[in-house]
Image (spheres, grey):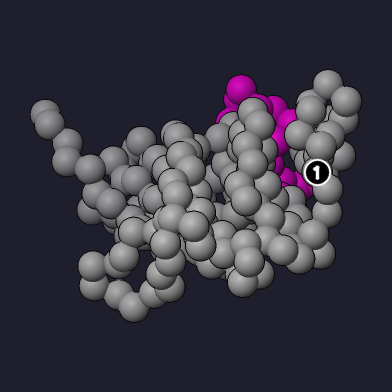
Amino acid sequence: MIENNEGLYVLHTKNTTYMFNVMEAGHLEHLYYGRRIKVDLDKENGGAWPFIEKHAFPPGNTNQYDREHATFTLEDMCLEMSSYGKGDIREPFIEVTHEDGSFTSDFLFEKAKVIKGKKEFETLPGSYGSEDEVETLEVTLVDKQYGLNLVMSYYVYEDCDVITRSAKLIKKCRIS
């Protein structure tokens, strides 16, 4: 089962819960994966929001993300998807060398949709399932600087107690 409330995504199987959030700057923050828990999605009553890190100032000697988010840094955030640049100093999820020689990528949330079933991969092996067996959450992240989309797909097999994930990098055509 996939639940969503204001950018908080909760994926449940029979015995597990996987949870992430779209942060104010647009990055995906990994919140929880483990034993199934009951998550109240009602923001007014606190709900799952205690899982979300709050920052009053950037810790220590860090790189500030941008001027609009002065208290935010990627150095101490647990991200769903990390890349080089913008202050995230961990091992990246994706490494891209751009045409201008830069390694910096900044993938930010654009949209998400839930789909019953799972599309088959055209060129790779993968899991499969009918509309009754699997739900898919497709999250599209965008790097506007370089015209890239990263589609993160989460496949929830509730009865089998399995959650899998895949990623697809798409270069968007630029029209000058």
Give how far across and how far down residue 98 sits, in percent: 29, 54
Q: In this rendering, would 11 be left or right of 44? A: left
Secondary element under disc 1, as helix, strand or loop, is loop
- Residue at x 81% of width, y 64% of height: 35
Residue 115 visible somewhere in the drawing: yes
Q: Which residues are magenta?
A: 60-78
For the C terminus, the image quarter is top left
Q: Is residue 86 above or below residue 17?
A: above
Q: Is residue 58 part of the magenta span, yes or no?
A: no
Q: In this rendering, would 80 be left or right of 124? A: right
Q: Is residue 118 above or below residue 10?
A: below
- Residue at x 63% of width, y 66% of height: 159
Q: In this rendering, would 63 be left or right of 114? A: right
Q: Is residue 63 part of the magenta span, yes or no?
A: yes
Q: Main secondary structure of the magenta part?
A: loop
Asked whether 156 or 83 is in front, the reply is 156
Which image quarter: residue 131?
Answer: bottom left
Q: Amino acid at mark 1?
A: Val
Give how far across and how far down residue 92 sits, in percent: 53, 63
Q: In this rendering, would 172 be left or right of 45? A: left
**Circle count:** 1
Residue hosting label 1: 39
